[in-house]
Amino acid sequence: MIAACLGTALLISAGPALSIPIRYAAVGAIGALIHPMIGLSLVLVVLAMAAPRRKRGDDGGALLLADQVALALRAGLTLEGALREARPDLPEALAGEVGHLLREARLGGLSRALASAGGAGERLYRITDRAVRTGAPVGPAVEALAEELRHEDHARRAAEARRLPVRLLLPLALLILPGFVLALVGPALVSSLARLDIGW
């Protein structure tokens, strides 16, 4: 128990400097010092908590970018101004991507910068570039993209929810059912062995 407490203290103090696989291994090892099943259950819980975070970041903030740009365009800003206003609220990687796009736009023009830009916001750049080149209204195109991204995000979350019962089978089989069976069968087994009088 003392070793487990020391290990927990070390993991808390050194946690930010450790890579994710090492953290999972450390959590499992600390739990295994108490009991192997506790170690396994801790690793499963940590993995279950980490998976949704990874999946939530899959779109890289493209939906947020489309929503912010659509809102700014509705307020009367130009596309370049809308991108500039949206940038502070974006995730770090996408904010850097938009910043690079704006620098390229100042040097070679917005249309050329949009045509050559890539990354998480590539779909927005392609749609706005097409609208800029053809003279079509940019706002409705961006709003349609935002709606499409929202539907994709909803479909992805629904698919994750459908997979949840399958992911819960392993913890259920390894951790909950054995305890439930033991709680049901244990008392009857102990009383039967006591009646046998085998000299415990």
Image: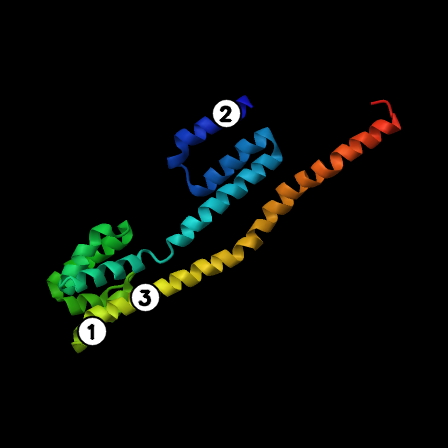
| Alpha carbon distance from label 3 to label 1 | 17 Å
Q: Nearer the viewer, mark 3 or mark 2?
A: 3
Q: Nearer the viewer, mark 3 or mark 1?
A: 3
Counting other residues with Cα less than 10 Å from the Cα at mark 2, is it few (<14), some (14-19), or many (20 or more)? few
Name the residue carrying label 2: 5
Q: Nearer the viewer, mark 2 or mark 1?
A: 1
Q: Secondary structure at mark 1?
A: helix
Query: Can you say which quadrant of the picture contains the C terminus?
Result: top right
Residue 131 circle label: 1
Between 36 and 137, the one lying in front of the other is: 137
Three-letter amino acid code at the position of disc 2: Cys
Residue lying at the far bottom of the rendered structure: 134
Is residue 136 placed above or below 172 in the rendered structure?
below
- Left or right: 159 as drawn, with respect to 94: right
Three-letter amino acid code at the position of disc 1: Ala
First reached walking from the N terminus: tag 3 or tag 2:
2
Q: Secondary structure at mark 3?
A: helix
Q: Residue visible at 24% across and 53% down?
A: 95
| Alpha carbon distance from label 2 to label 1 | 61 Å
Name the residue carrying label 3: 147
| Alpha carbon distance from label 3 to label 2 | 49 Å
Counting other residues with Cα less than 10 Å from the Cα at mark 3, is it few (<14), some (14-19), or many (20 or more)? some
Q: Residue visible at 58% across and 29% down?
A: 34
Between 42 and 183, the one lying in front of the other is: 183
First reached walking from the N terminus: tag 3 or tag 1:
1
